[in-house]
Amino acid sequence: MEIMQRSKKTILSFILPALIIYIGIVIIPIFNTVYYSFFKWNILDTLKFTGLNNFINLFTKDAIFIKSMKNTFLLMFWSLAIQTPLAILLAIAISGNIKGKRYFKTVFFLPNILSSVAIGLLWSFIYNPEFGIINRLLSSIGLGNFTRLWLADEKTVMGSVIAVICWQFVGYHMIIYLAAIENIPAELKEAALIDGVNQNKMIGYIILPLIRPIVGIDMVLMATGSLRFFDLIYVMTNGGPNHASEVIASYMYYKSFRDYQYGYGSAVSVVLLTLCLVVTFLLNKIFQTEEIQY
Amino acid sequence: MKRISVVLVCFVLLASLLSGCDTSDVGTGSESEKTKLKIEAWGIETDPNSRIIKEAVNLFNERNSNAVIEIEFTEQEQYKTKIATLMAANEAPDLFNTWAAGFLKPFVTSGKVYSISDDLNKDSWKNSYINGIFAPFTFDGKIYAAPTTQTVACLFYNKEIFDQYGLKAPETYSELKNVIETLNKNGIIPFALGNKAPWVGAMFSELVANRIGGSEPFNKVYEGTGTWLDPSFIEAGRIMYELVEMNAFPEGFNALDNDPAQELFKEGKAAMLVMGSWAIQQLTNEESPLKGKVDVARFPAMEGGKGNINSWLGQPDQSFAISTNCKNKEAAVEFLKTIASKEIQTKFAEAGNLVATKITIDPAKSNPVAIKVAELQKDMEELFLFYDVALGSTIGNEYNNAIQAITAGKDPEEALRALQEFTEQNRE
């Protein structure tokens, strides 16, 4: 073992295969994409260099891109605003010694193990204005006025999709917080109890401060995940109606693979990459704390 | 010792891999006197039309001594991506299925497609086709593909329901409005329209726009000399919304898929359907409750409109083009002629298609609805293309989206202005 660690060649020989694959399918394509974003290219003709034109068009002329960017931020904001507190609350609720703990854990986590396509179809049925349960339920309890064409109405589509996304992912984040909470040493809690701390203060002074770094990491995961969100949108709405649920990732997909505007699509993905980096950086700044030592 | 055995096993595996390649090489070598031609086609192998195309391939392979054809089918949406990728990688198949106008254009301009103009003019082959059908395959005066069938948008209606309420197929917009009112009074949905995929409503609006303003406004948009803000498009948008307000479409039609909408028509819950002629087979097959009850009419005229009731919206369909890489162009042209031959075209007609060539169909063997369409089409003065076919998918889809937004209540002028901006930015 020692010999292996000492010899850099041995280490390299273990890392190299994975590194080569990683460079080949992640790093190089990223640089390629940045390169293509300065061109006009429909994959058939030769590349035409257009400088920053793609980017200028994106931000000054392309109303659909602006709309998709708004939707993306909307999605990110609501994901963070709904999922973070909800996931922490759920985690705290089931971290105690409650009855049926494993049952709840499984139930909340369940949506996560389903494929997004299945979830998309499932919720398309739930939202279906004819036979979906939401509209049926509303009209059966006399709230027929509140029935909507959930996924076909420009006003409700984004909200409907965000609700599904939160439902799908809240369990995942709950598990992360649950692990963090259960990692807090029992001595700390015991000491607090001896000092006469009640349940609310326990949460406020012990649990939340101690899981703060995890909250930071989790929010980065959540934010970047929502920024590049694609699958449910693709399955449930295709970005429609009339681009009302278009997000940056779906717009990039349509521009590149349906309209064959690869240069333009690349520019969209460069913007997306930059956004992800900026958001990660900002969130890291906000949650920058010293390493916790128990 | 162990190490040696491992090396040996590796060697044997490698050798077997290589030999695998070898045998396949030998396989192609043995048929070297015949050129192998590859066709990429869209559709599913078991579709009725795909079967007929396969029959044509077999027929060709039996008769032709210079070439042997191999055909591969891919589902339509995937086909679009596949063919674009193959073209880009310079691995175009010898022959390939293509849509007219917008889809074919980029391939032609980048020099990937062989022009069949000269071959068409030889032995008056071109005259066997319906007049004017080559227009959407013509770029700079040269023709680049030959169609197999054609599809047109038809107004289908349920004869039984119409008879029951003493209605007849509407010929003008005001007659149509009366029909809609009567149907609504009797609890029957006037049009089975499922606009979740927005091309369905867009197709409807294209007919309305053409009846109002004729083909000129659209042709001007196509050439870049006119805009979507032409009064005829705005008026068409207004009429689409008027129809929505009259409850001419099912409740929640913007959330309704096309197939379930078509079911409404089949089950007799809706009385009319504006759909491409491709629906004829589904509407009239043995299992359909509508069998024998469907009739078809021309889309009604608009009062005071410039459009002609004998203009049909549609496209030449399942067309084949030859790529410039094709190893044996003569044989490829021969295959196009096989497709256009009387025996293959008759099979297409009997399967309920409208064919691309001038053949006479035996009414006993063919679908009565298809025959009725063919009869109506005898007076056809013009075939104008589906907008998303003519303009290509980028601008075409945006038109479809704009119409969907209008039917959901957006102001037509505002929607069309946004579409115009989009069109200017995305024009090639």
Image (cartoon, rainbow, N blue to C red):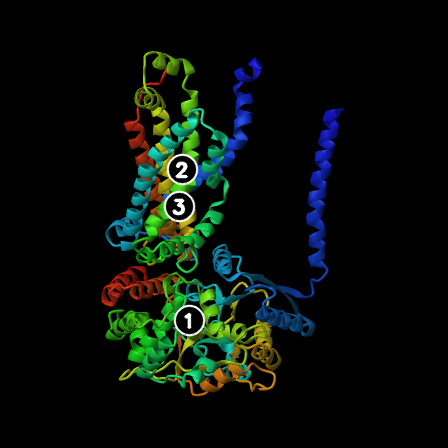
Residue type at mark 3? Val
| Vertical position of residue A41 compared to residue B291: above or below | above
Q: Report crowding for label 3: few under 14, some 14 to 19, many 20 or more residues within 10 A (C-alpha).
A: some
A71 left or right, relative to A4:
left
Q: State the SS at label 2.
A: helix
At x 64% / y 65%, what residue is drawn?
Answer: B35
Occupied quadrant, residue B13: top right
Q: Which residue is mark 1?
A: B192
Separation of marks 2 and 1 at Cα, in angstroms: 40 Å
Residue A48 in picture, x, y percent from top left: 35, 53
> What quarter of the picture does the N terminus of chain B occupy?
top right
| Vertical position of residue B12 compared to residue B239: above or below | above
Q: Could you tell me if the residues under marks 1 and 3 are in contact, i.e. CB atoms within 8 Å?
A: no
Separation of marks 2 and 3 at Cα, in angstroms: 10 Å
Circles 2 and 3 on the same subunit: yes
The residue lying toward the viewer, choosing from B141 and B204, is: B204
Q: Report crowding for label 2: few under 14, some 14 to 19, many 20 or more residues within 10 A (C-alpha).
A: many
Residue type at mark 1? Ala
Q: Which residue is mark 2?
A: A170
- How many discs appear? 3
Residue type at mark 2? Val
Q: Which residue is mark 3?
A: A164
Q: State the SS at label 3.
A: helix
Disc 3 chain ID: A
At x 43% / y 58%, what residue is drawn?
Answer: A131
At x 38% / y 71%, what residue is drawn?
Answer: B203
Residue A172 in picture, x, y percent from top left: 43, 35
